[in-house]
Image (cartoon, rainbow, N blue to C red):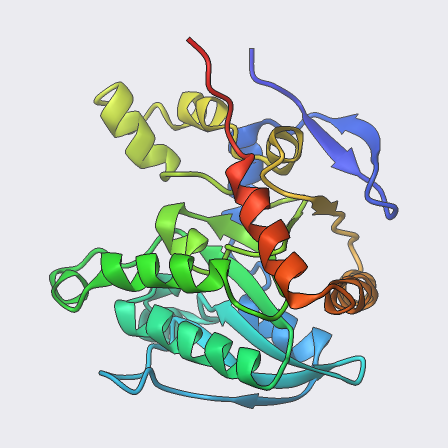
Amino acid sequence: MAAEYTAYGPNGRPNQTAPFNAYQILQKARKNGRFTGLDFIRNLTTEFMELHGDRRFADDPAIVGGVARLLGMPVTVIAHEKGGDLNDKARRNFGSAHPEGYRKALRLMKQAEKFHRPVLCIVDTAGAFCGIGAEARGEGSAIAENLMEMMTLKTPILSLFIGEGGSGGALGLAVADTVWMLENSVYSVISPEGCASILWKDASKVKEACECLHMTPSDLLKLGVIERIIPEPEDRGELYSLLREAISEEFYKLNALPLEDLCRNRYQRFRKLGVYGE
C-alpha cells in the first residue's frame, strides 16, 4: 500500500494526514505553471543583480545567480531555473544544467566566501544535463568539485528545494548547513522513471518507484536528510513572507557560529547520514 503524505501547517509541524502518495507529490512538483527559481529570487530578495558566466566556457541559463538583499542582509543567491513559457524552457534546458552552470555557481559561492555573504541555493531540477557536450566538458567533475568546495566553504549555506531535486544535479547545490523542502517537492538519487527502468526494466512502474525511493519531504525529514518542511499556502505572498523571515533568521543564527564550528557541523551533518546494517 502506498504511504500517505503528511501535510504541514504554518508552524512547520504536521497538522493532518493528506491523501497524497509519493507519485501525487511528484506530479505536484512537476506541475506546469508551478513557480520557478527566478520567482523566488524576485519575491524573496531585493536589489538582485545577476552575474553571468563561469570564466571558463560560457554562461548557462539553467542556473541563475547573483547578489541581492534579503531583508537588508547582503546574500548570494543561486537557483536552478526551468523557465516560463516553452521558448524560455528550451533556452534554459528545462533546468538541467551543463558543467558551466555548476562552475558559475561555484564561482559565485567562492565570491560570497570572500565577502562573508551567506549563500541561498534554490533547487529545482530533474537532473544535470547528460548530453555529449556536457560530458565532454566535465559534467561529473564539475559537480564533484562543487561538493568538495561547498563542504568547506567558510560562509553559511542554506538549500531550499522548491520542486524536483534530481540526483547529482540537485546535490551540486545542496551541500549546505541546512536543507529545507517545500511540502510539494521531491529529492531522490535518480528519477522515478530511471529507477523503474533499472529495477523492473519497465518505465511505466513509476508509482512503485516513487514509493521505493522515499523521495517525499516527510520521508526525508524522518531520515535526517533535511531539517525543515515548508508549508505551501494557497496565497504565494504568504509563502514568500514566511520564507523571508525564516531564512533571514537562519542566516543570522549560522553567522553567529565561529567559522571552524560552521564547517565542522556541516561536515558532521553529512557524515551521519545513512544507516549501516547486515
Q: Residue at x 33, y 62 (%)?
A: 145
Q: Residue at x 32, y 57 (%)?
A: 144
Q: Is residue 260 above or below residue 167?
A: below
Q: How many circles with numbers are drawn on the protein?
A: 0
Find residue 8 and report its image quarter: top right
Q: Residue at x 32, y 30 (%)?
A: 195
Task: Report whether residue 63 is seen.
Answer: yes
Where residue 234 appears, as percent x and y from the top left, is 78, 54
Q: Residue at x 54, y 49 (%)?
A: 267
Residue closer to the observer: 39 or 263: 263
Task: Report whether residue 92 is seen.
Answer: no
User: In the visual, does 23 lie left or right of 244?
Assistant: left
Where residue 95 appears, as percent x and y from the top left, is 40, 63
Please state, as top left, top right, bottom left or bottom right, where the N terminus lies in the image. Answer: top right
Where residue 152 appears, as percent x and y from the top left, is 50, 62
Residue closer to the observer: 28 or 73: 73
Please state, as top left, top right, bottom left or bottom right, where the C terminus lies in the image. Answer: top left
User: In the visual, does 135 lie left or right of 228?
Assistant: left
Residue closer to the observer: 229 or 159: 159
Q: Is residue 75 above or below residue 16?
A: below
User: In the visual, does 219 lie left or right of 245?
Assistant: left
Find residue 122 and report its image quarter: bottom right
User: In the visual, does 109 lie left or right of 191?
Assistant: right
Q: Is residue 201 above or below residue 272?
A: above
